[in-house]
């Protein structure tokens, strides 16, 4: 065929690899498997019937695939073991160490919330003085949905004043519709999220939501915050059973209504304190409580929401 010795040898080896020909020689007749012939004594090949060669090729491919599947199974088992050791919260429960991380970047906080959504196994507890804050409501509701679909028990406490704000009231209604156990309380001390009693996200400064958050790992510290949550949970009112506050400022003390009117007129805190006969610190606390109850992030927003509810009339 005009092939060189190198080309002839290469084609011959390829046919042997494909099983279309096999080496033969003195030992061929005494061996059950032609492939077992000693290559040192074999320099002659014999042709194999195409259907036999095809069956051998299929068997060889099946063996190769079986080996790959076994390797994949072993790799999957190894990765699952590693994931169990480093990602699942049950492993953290076995450690008594505590880790604290300060989260100053809002994107990092959002990523931590997503990570908790993936890793939480049993229960998620949270408290929120305001309903939505900086986060997109749909994103929070999507996390709720994914957690509940996993079988996680999700409980949330919100300020009962949020039911007076249409947007916030609708957000609470959607959470309850998804299956979140929602309760309302007159006072919610701070934002807090607890996952499986192993992770806790807390504000760096409860009075300033922009100051960042603290991520705490380890049951030794998280159990204390869980106890605080349980106390607030048992004293709060289940969503749907509360008596909605009437418009016009019902539920506010005379002192709070007076402070709101004076602040809305542009009066400084010092003058409000003198007019009410209280300390400047009391006025600051009163404003903070009103902002929390109305879910306002600034004094301007507090005035807008109070006016919309008729509390300044």
Image (cartoon, rainbow, N blue to C red):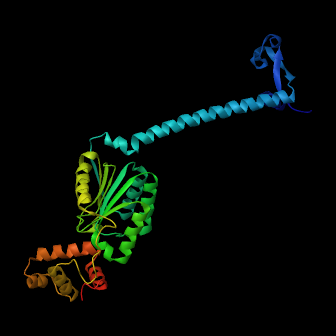
Q: Is residue 265 left or right of residue 168?
A: left
Q: x and y percent of residue 146 in the render? A: 46, 57
Residue 135 visible in the current orientation: no
| Residue 149 percent coordinates (x, y) | 46, 54
Whether residue 145 appears in this view of the structure is: yes
Looking at the picture, does residue 157 appear above or below residue 227? below
- Work out which quarter of the rendered image holds the C terminus and state it: bottom left
User: In the rendered view, does 55 fall on the left or right side of 264?
Assistant: right
Q: Is residue 86 left or right of residue 13?
A: left
Q: Residue furthest right?
A: 1
Near-viewer residue (172 or 142): 172
Q: How many numbered dots are placed on residues in this image?
A: 0
Identify the residue shown where x is 29% and y is 69%.
242
Reply above or below: 249 against 126: below
- 247 vs 288, nearest the viewer: 247
Residue 178 picture location, percent across and down: 43, 62
Question: Where, by quadrant of the figure, is residue 12 drawn?
Answer: top right
Residue 198: x %, y % from top left: 31, 48
Location of the N terminus (image quadrant): top right
Q: Quadrant of residue 131?
A: bottom left
Q: Nearer the viewer, residue 46 or 183?
A: 183
């Amino acid at each position: 065929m005009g092939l060189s010795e190198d080309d002839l040898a290469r084609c011959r080896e390829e046919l042997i690899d494909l099983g279309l020909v096999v080496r033969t020689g003195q030992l061929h007749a005494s061996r059950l498997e032609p492939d077992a012939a000693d290559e040192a004594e074999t320099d002659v090949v014999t042709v194999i019937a195409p259907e036999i060669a095809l069956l051998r090729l299929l068997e060889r491919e099946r063996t190769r695939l079986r080996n790959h599947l076994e390797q994949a199974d072993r790799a999957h088992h190894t990765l699952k073991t590693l994931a169990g050791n480093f990602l699942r919260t049950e492993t953290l429960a076995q450690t008594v160490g505590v880790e604290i991380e300060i989260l100053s970047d809002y994107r990092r906080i959002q990523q931590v919330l997503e990570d908790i959504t993936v890793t939480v196994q049993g229960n998620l507890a949270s408290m929120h003085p305001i309903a939505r804050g900086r986060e997109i409501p749909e994103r929070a509701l999507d996390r709720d949905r994914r957690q509940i679909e996993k079988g996680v028990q999700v409980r949330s406490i919100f300020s009962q004043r949020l039911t007076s704000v249409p947007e916030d009231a609708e957000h609470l209604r959607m959470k309850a519709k998804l299956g979140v156990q929602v309760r309302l309380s007159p006072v919610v001390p701070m934002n807090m999220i607890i996952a499986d009693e192993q992770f806790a996200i807390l504000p760096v400064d409860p009075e300033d939501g922009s100051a960042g958050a603290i991520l705490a790992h380890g049951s030794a510290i998280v159990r204390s915050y869980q106890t605080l949550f349980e106390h607030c949970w048992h004293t709060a009112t289940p969503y749907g059973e509360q008596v909605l506050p009437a418009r016009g400022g019902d539920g506010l003390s005379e002192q709070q209504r007076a402070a709101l009117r004076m602040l809305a007129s542009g009066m400084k805190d010092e003058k409000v304190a003198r007019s009410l006969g209280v300390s400047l610190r009391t006025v600051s606390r009163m404003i903070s409580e009103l902002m929390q109850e109305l879910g306002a992030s600034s004094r301007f927003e507090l005035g807008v929401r109070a006016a919309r509810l008729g509390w300044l009339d």
